[in-house]
Amino acid sequence: MFQTVDNKTLVFLPYDIETSIEFDRRNLEEFILHTSEEYMDESHKRHLDNCITLHGYYPWTFGWGIRDYVPLAGFDKKFPNIIDYIKDKLCLRRIRKLTFVKQQEEVWPHQDADEDGWAIRMHIWNDTQDRMYFQKVRPEFAEKKDLKNKIITGLEPPWIADPNINPYIGSEIMYDEILFPEKHYANFPLRKGAWGFSNRWAVHGTDKKLPNEQKCIMVIYGDKDIDRLRLLHNRSYEKYKDFSITL
Ligand SMILES: [Fe+2]
């Protein structure tokens, strides 16, 4: 959808939107903590187990706001401003899934599960010096989605962790074979803000942060209002071309 710029592939673009949402951060922290275990579903549990098997730890805490279009734990009553903000500023007709991801550790290169390849995220708070980077996927793997998923993402299916099926388990070779080695670091124009990125042509990861740094990312899936999003996208590219990453 938004993938090619001057014959290169756009993999990161900050969005030009107003960033203030009124909500109580302490309430949202509590909400994340409360829903992180209470509302974890089976597929996420598998993801968590796979990551621990593959990498030895799980770098995130997930809070669950909406799943399958249904608000969880009274999210819509507690944080109506966040829902309004997403629909208005981030151009979604309906929100299918909304999570809040607190990142505690270094994150290995991976891809997220955004089905159409273009993902929307927002720092809902962020006092880190960001170290998020992108690495280009070698072209022969960019088209082999299943193979790449098996090896890199750890998302689904659960047999990624089965060494009889995944010969790459526990091996550094997988990254060298699939990715170009250069890391391209994201540079955010604002501490808090939204951005789009590609899950098809690149992987992303985050270097280790300092112990006292805090970051929470809002992860948004839903029915995009493509016409409005395209306008936002084009406007953002004009403004933040120098911050964008094309590979
Ligand atoms: Fe990710």
Image (cartoon, helix red, strand yellow):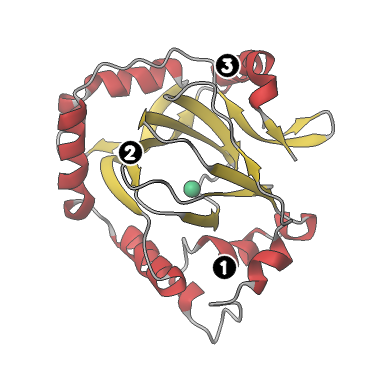
Q: Earlier in the sequence, mark 3 or mark 2?
A: 2
Which image quadrant is residue 196 in?
top right
Residue contact between numbered discs 1 and 3, judged by CB atoms under 8 Å = no
Residue contact between numbered discs 2 and 1, judged by CB atoms under 8 Å = no
With respect to residue 129, does 92 lie above or below?
above
User: Mark 1 CB in 8 Å range of ligand 1?
Assistant: no
User: Mark 3 CB in 8 Å range of ligand 1?
Assistant: no
Q: Outermost residue, right direction?
A: 7
Query: Quarter holding the N terminus?
Result: top right
**Secondary-structure class at tag 1:** helix
Q: What residue lies at 30% left-to-right and 50% top-to-bottom?
A: 61
With respect to residue 111, does 79 lie above or below?
above
Q: Amino acid at mark 3?
A: Leu
Question: Pointer 2: residues within 10 angstroms few (<14), some, or many (20+)?
Answer: some
Q: Which residue is mark 2?
A: 214
Q: Position of residue 19 (x, y in %)?
A: 41, 17
Q: Earlier in the sequence, mark 2 or mark 1?
A: 1
Whether residue 143 is visible here, answered yes or no, is: no
Horizontally, residue 72 falls left or right of residue 9, namely left
Q: What residue lies at 17% left-to-right and 38% top-to-bottom?
A: 31
Horizontally, residue 64 falls left or right of residue 5, namely left
Comparing labels 3 and 2, the label whose residue is closer to the camera: 2
Q: Which residue is mark 1?
A: 150
Q: Which residue is mark 3?
A: 232
**Secondary-structure class at tag 2:** loop
Between the C-alphas of marks 2 and 1, the distance is 31 Å
Between the C-alphas of marks 3 and 2, the distance is 28 Å
Q: What residue lies at 21% left-to-right and 28% top-to-bottom?
A: 25
**Secondary-structure class at tag 3:** helix
Q: Position of residue 170 (x, y in %)?
A: 53, 77
Q: Earlier in the sequence, mark 1 or mark 3?
A: 1
